[in-house]
Amino acid sequence: MNAQLQPTGSAYFIAKETEKPENHTLSVLVDNEPGVLARVIGLFSGRGYNIESLTVSETEHEKHLSRITIVTRGTPHVLEQIKHQLERIVPVHRVVDLTVRSHEFGQERPLERELALVKVAGTGEARVEALRLADAFRASVIDANTEHFIFEITGKGSKIDQFIAIMKPLGLVEICRTGVAALNRGPQGM
């Protein structure tokens, strides 16, 4: 392999050349205590893994447990390495690759949603068109005056990407997006 194609410090080039990178959604159940998120993120950055999306929230208040949802990209070999390395971190209770689990249940992907707040400024026809398109995308107006709208939109990442692209020529000012929240379909839990 050509030395120019091998960046230093990245685990992506350890994998076999025949394996193709894939996006996977991991769900990690951890103790809700200081430093846990930093340790999980440190595992990714220290090994050259990239995080496409990250969402963290306490999900079981009485047990002080939080759920970290991570979307990452890698070959099957690299993704398996990530999962095993996450499982070795002390306050991690469970790691589930929701993408693999969904395939086991005969589904293509886990159920994934994002939320975005999108600010659009404009007047006249652009303003009317922004409102019309927001309605078509089922985005809610959560703040408005005569100069701008702030829309709230939820859905798959691709839907949000499309909405943002449509709003750009109509006066897009700024965007704030959550990371992916994901669950597998069916009665089973993590």
Image: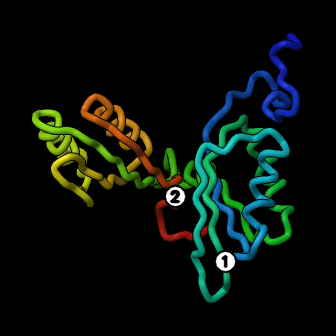
- The residue drawn where x is 67% and y is 82% is 64
Work out whether residue 31 or residue 23 is closer to the camera in this orientation and state it.
31
Q: Secondary structure at mark 1?
A: strand
Work out whether residue 183 or residue 115 is closer to the camera in this orientation and state it.
115
With 29 as the anchor, is 161 left or right in this view? left
**Disc 2: which residue:** 182
The image quarter in which residue 28 lies: bottom right
The total of numbered circles placed on residues is 2
Q: Amino acid at mark 2?
A: Ala
- The residue drawn where x is 67% and y is 31% is 21
- Compared to 129, does 59 lie above or below? below
Query: Earlier along the polypeptide chain: callout 2 or callout 1?
Result: 1
- In this picture the colour scheme is rainbow
Q: Secondary structure at mark 2?
A: strand
- Compared to 126, does 185 lie above or below? below
Q: Amino acid at mark 1?
A: Leu
- Compared to 161, does 25 lie above or below? below
Q: Residues within 10 Å of mark 1 (few under 14, many from 20)?
A: some
**Disc 1: which residue:** 65
Image coordinates of residue 159 in percent, x first then y, are: 36, 42
Image coordinates of residue 13 in percent, x first then y, are: 82, 27
Quadrant position of the C terminus in the picture: bottom right
